Image (spheres, helix red, strand yellow):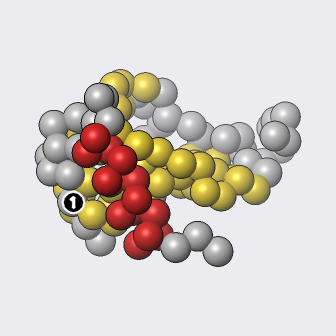
Amino acid sequence: MPDLTRLAETHLAAALTDEHGRSAELIIRDDVLRQSVIALRSGSELAEHNSPHAATLQVLVGRVRVTGAGDGEVAAGEIHLLTHERHAVAALEDSVFLLTTVTSMPGQAHDGS
């Protein structure tokens, strides 16, 4: 079972020394469900991208801003529902979050990988 506290510490340390200011790891993969730990150094971001069918972002450490539809700041201990529209995530301080996604909806074809 993944230890989120340890993963947050490890990935934040890696993000602080990464030239792009980020570090990530897919920690759970179960059919269409994916959970990833993502760390961003303050001032770095994940550029605008499409959202999967369903997704949430739960901040474990720090504070991030989600831009696009459903703009908002999300702080440690808070969870944010990501809309189905393009969005970006910017670190307002050194941050780590758990990204949970569903890659296809029930009844839709998926590759199972």
Eyeballing the image, is 79 above or below 33? below
Quadrant for residue 68, please give it: top left
Eyeballing the image, is 101 above or below 7? above
Front residue of 17/65: it is: 17
Quadrant for residue 61, please give it: bottom left
x, y percent for residue 65: 21, 44
User: Callout 1, which amino acid?
Assistant: Gly
x, y percent for residue 105: 71, 44
- Which residue is painted at 16% across and 37% down in the image? 43
Q: Is residue 67 visible?
A: no
Eyeballing the image, is 59 above or below 91? below
x, y percent for residue 101: 57, 49
The kind of secondary structure element at disc 1 is loop
- Which residue is painted at 84% across and 34% down in the image? 111
As drawn, the residue found furthest toward the front would be 17
The local crowd at label 1, few if under 14, some if 14 to 19, many if 20 or more residues have their Cα within 10 Å, is many
Image quarter in which the C terminus is found: top right
Eyeballing the image, is 15 above or below 86? below
Front residue of 16/46: it is: 16
- Which residue is painted at 35% across and 25% down in the image? 48
Q: Which residue is mark 1?
A: 62
Left or right of 87, for residue 61: left
- Which residue is painted at 56% across and 37% down in the image? 52
x, y percent for residue 75: 22, 62
Q: Is residue 110 visible?
A: yes
Quadrant for residue 97, please give it: bottom left
